[in-house]
Amino acid sequence: MRRSLFVPALLLTGWFAAPGSAQDGRILVKAGDSVGPANLVSLELRSAAQVAATPALGTVLYAAATDAPAGTDELLLATTRNDALGSQTTAILLREGDPEPAAASSPLLSFPDASMTSLAQGSRVQILESGTVPFPQTHLYWDSTPIARYAERVNVSGLPFGGPVPLIHVRFRQARANGARQVLATTDIWPRLADTVPPFPVLVRYQLDASGAVTSAALLLDAGADALRPTPYRDLPQDPRATDQDAAGHWITRALGIDGRWRVVRDGVELALEGGASPRAGRT
């Protein structure tokens, strides 16, 4: 199932090699290369996220559209490079057409986003799209354990509405994990019984235990400004690369304000404003 976001190449960055070294910025895989044990040629690359154990050892997770037959051409892959051994290996983690882990009757369509906690843990958080076109459904997973699925009731502290007005998940945009088993996710939610209120995006953090079960979930940013809920923001980015967190759980994202300008927000504090003053004189 083809997607429009096109990435021509994935690069080895400073996580894989010492910054400024000859190895820094090498191409790991590019459109047109063979990927995976089946030697399928990658046509598009996207949704890349990397994690490293040392500057010379790391793994990149990425989705690729390949020349495989229609209905099986979307892949979620992991490429691991070990400079000490001079090796690079690629594994197919999931393929379009595979059954969704928690719903065997629902085939996977694509892989909008994925990230790893750490190489030592070897676990990943991933957004899986399943169902049928033109009505695909997105779900948030920790390996094969669902964190939250499409149309499930939202169980997150600090959200508006609630009580007699159940909130449900309608789409997941991005997900990032860290070694503390914290999952940062942007999800569009909808007050199912409030027909006058459209779905709205929120940034949520899930805390998981070793099995992948959710132990707590909290609202970090509400971007659903409307007349009933005058929050400062009205949207969050679609691009999964625009949001991230570090090992300590500090997070950063962009948010569209009610004035129509984008902000950079870190841990709830605005760091930069579109059109605002720049550290460089004469620039905005």
Image (cartoon, grey):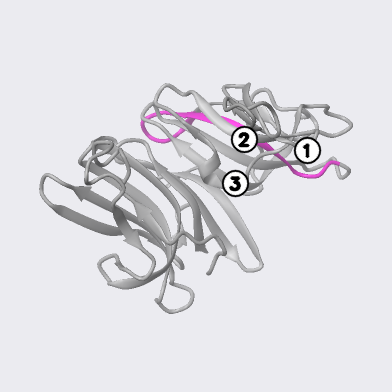
Q: CA distance from mark 2 to mark 1?
A: 12 Å
The amino acid on which the numbered mark 3 sits, given as a three-letter code, is: Phe
The amino acid on which the numbered mark 1 sits, given as a three-letter code, is: Gly
| Left-right relation of 35 to 9 | left
- 265, 279: nearer the viewer: 279
- 111, 212: nearer the viewer: 111
| Left-right relation of 72 to 191 | left
Whether residue 212 appears in magenta in the rendering, the answer is: yes
Q: Position of residue 278 (x, y in %)?
A: 62, 27
Label 1 Cα neighbours within 10 Å, binned few <14 / some 14-19 / many ≥20: few
Whether residue 64 appears in magenta in the rendering, the answer is: no
* Residue highlighted by disc 2: 254
Dot 2 lies on which element? Answer: strand
Q: Position of residue 87 (x, y in %)?
A: 15, 54
Q: Can you say whether 60 is above or below 2 in the image?
A: above
Dot 3 lies on which element? Answer: strand
Q: Can you say whether 257 is above or below 11 in the image?
A: above
Task: Name the disc covering residue 260, or none.
Answer: 1
Label 3 Cα neighbours within 10 Å, binned few <14 / some 14-19 / many ≥20: many
Question: What residue range appears in magenta?
Answer: 197-214
Q: Answer with mark 2 or mark 1, whichever residue precedes in sequence.
A: 2
Q: Position of residue 258 (x, y in %)?
A: 80, 33
* Residue highlighted by disc 3: 172
- 258, 193: nearer the viewer: 258
Q: Answer with mark 3 or mark 1, whichever residue precedes in sequence.
A: 3
Q: Quadrant of residue 283?
A: top right
